[in-house]
Image (cartoon, rainbow, N blue to C red):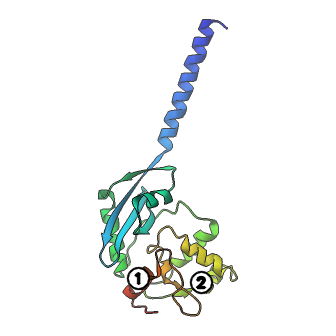
């Protein structure tokens, strides 16, 4: 191979790798995250993409919240990008029917069907894990339905706190029973 052939191969290689790197950089999506305080609830972490809120977490540390976020997205800390979302979430807690854009970027098909069904439960009402499993066509999968509630990436917006045990007891909640009781109390549900 002559030096001209090597030079031509080098130029082709550089152009190809530059094109691949540019295409990769263009495919990386930005998302925003931040921490705010909600009256009566306390600290809340929010993450959103251009399509909507994709994760919500009550309390916890910045590092644990970031670990839970998909690594395929470039996360930028910015409270200013989340001010309107925080107001909407606060209104939601107060019982107002807010349209909040969400993006489910995680979850199995079963989990997503559970989350979709939970969204249909109106403010001030509860349903059981057994009802939830039957409502998605898997009546014996009430434990899987409970696990799907626990994996809900945007509690409150997908109101899994409205799901209780079939015996009428409070059941579980990914953010703790104390917060679940407080959220239910806001909806005038006392267990």
User: Which of the pair 32/171 is nearer the observer?
Assistant: 171
* In this rendering, position of residue 182 left or right of residue 144: left
Q: Which residue is mark 1?
A: 183
The secondary structure type at the circle numbered 2 is helix
Q: Image quadrant of residue 7?
A: top right
At x 49%, y 83%, the residue is: 162
88 versus 139 height, above or below: above
Quarter of image, res 66? bottom left
Query: 65 left or right of 133?
Result: left
Q: Position of residue 123 (x, y in %)?
A: 43, 84
- On the picture, is 51 further left or further right than 132? left
Inter-mark Cα distance, 1 to 2: 18 Å
**Label 2 crowd (10 A; few <14 / some 14-19 / many >=20):** many
Look at mark 2 in the image and give the residue it sits on: 129
Residue 154 % position (x, y):
47, 69
Q: Nearer the viewer, residue 85 or 186?
A: 186
Look at the picture and state if 91 lies above or below 72. Answer: below
Q: Position of residue 39 (x, y in %)?
A: 29, 76
> Residue 9: image x %, image y %?
61, 16
Location of the N terminus by quadrant is top right
Question: Which of pointers 1 and 2 lies earlier in the amino acid sequence?
Answer: 2
Residue name at image x 47 percent, y 40 percent: 26
User: What secondary structure is marked by label 1?
Assistant: helix
Residue in the picture at 51% in, 55% down: 70
């Amino acid at each position: 191979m002559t030096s001209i052939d090597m030079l031509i191969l080098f130029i082709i290689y550089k152009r190809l790798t530059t094109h691949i790197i540019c295409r990769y950089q263009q495919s990386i999506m930005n998302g925003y995250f931040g921490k705010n305080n909600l009256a009566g609830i306390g600290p809340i972490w929010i993450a959103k993409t251009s399509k909507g809120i994709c994760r919500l977490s009550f309390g916890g540390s910045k590092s644990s919240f970031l670990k839970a976020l998909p690594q395929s997205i470039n996360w930028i800390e910015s409270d200013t990008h989340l001010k309107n979302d925080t107001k909407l979430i606060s209104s939601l807690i107060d019982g107002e029917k807010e349209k909040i854009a969400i993006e489910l970027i995680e979850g199995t098909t079963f989990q997503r069907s559970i989350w979709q069904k939970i969204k249909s439960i109106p403010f001030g009402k509860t349903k059981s894990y057994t009802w939830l499993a039957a409502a998605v066509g898997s009546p014996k999968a009430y434990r899987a339905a409970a696990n799907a509630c626990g994996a809900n990436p945007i509690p409150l917006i997908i109101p899994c706190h409205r799901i209780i045990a079939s015996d009428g007891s409070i059941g579980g909640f990914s953010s703790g029973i104390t917060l679940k009781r407080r959220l239910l109390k806001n909806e005038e549900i006392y267990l």
